[in-house]
Image: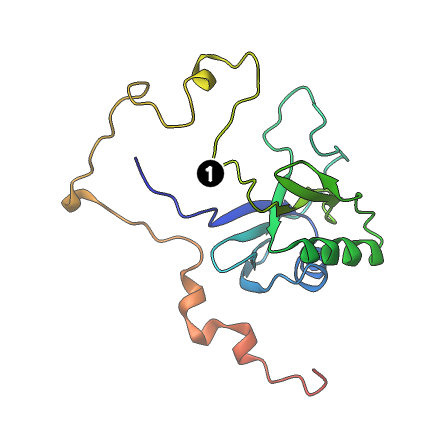
Amino acid sequence: MPRYSGVNHLALVTGDMDATVRFWRDLLGMRLVAGLGRPGYRHYFFEIDGRDMVAFFEWPGARPLPMKDHGVPVRGPVAFDHVSIGVASQEDLWDVRGRLEAAGCEPSPVVDHGFIHSVYCFDPNMIPIEFSWAVPGADPRARPAMTDPAPGAPGAEGPEPRPGHWPPPVPQPEAEREVYPGEGRELLEPERDFWRRRPPDPGA
């Protein structure tokens, strides 16, 4: 089985990158670490921690989602409910809640889910966000549990991946491996870096 190292980035959509930067960078305090752009297209990355990021595409004509509260069932095509972002301590959770409340974002009360305490809100794109503090000693990854009294057959098999349900992987010979160029390589070209090319702001 492959080994994973976390969520590199979660890619979301906005029609207003300026409002998105103000919320995610300036209100929540996540550094804007990469910005790609050309006419009609922007793709910005915000640092959650040393490993994980959240990113946004800005597409002309994209509109905020209709308000759909966290965890409320819907019918029809759907692929996403909400994103939960971990915070390092209980104090950080209250700090985030205080920032959201001061900004008029109407955060939820702190909710005790047993293994996490959470605060819920929406970003300017009406994306439902949860901020979660992991209760010490209650991490379900350390002791997986199934309390659904009637899980389907796959869920009843336990937490570990089960072989035999998919075809075996097809090894790609090293001589046949190709890597295609894509967006983002320009971030490594110092002469294209807007922040470094722009004269320092004396008022900053």
Give the residue displayed 48% in from the left and 31% down from the top. 144
Residue nearer the viewer, 139 or 69: 139
Residue 70: give x, y in percent of width and height. 71, 34
Residue nearer the viewer, 9 or 37: 9
What kind of colouring is applied to the model shown?
rainbow
Question: Which residue is the site of mark 1?
Answer: 142
Residue placed furthest toward the front: 137
Q: Quadrant of residue 166?
A: top left
Residue nearer the viewer, 116 or 45: 116
Q: Secondary structure at mark 1?
A: loop
Q: Quadrant of residue 75?
A: top right
Whether residue 62 is visible to the viewer of this picture, yes or no, is no
Q: Is residue 146 left or right of residue 126?
A: left
Amino acid type indicated by mark 1: Ala
Residue nearer the viewer, 52 or 180: 52
Residue 123: give x, y in percent of width and height. 72, 48
Q: Quadrant of residue 82?
A: top right
Give the residue displayed 28% in from the left and 19% down from the top. 164
Task: Answer above or below: position of 190 versus 52.
Answer: below
Give the residue displayed 44% in from the left and 75% down from the top. 190
Q: Residues within 10 Å of mark 1 (few under 14, many from 20)?
A: few
Task: Answer above or below: position of 150 versus 15.
Answer: above
Whether residue 193 is visible to the viewer of this picture, yes or no, is yes
Residue placed furthest toward the bottom: 202
Q: Is residue 45 left or right of residue 169?
A: right
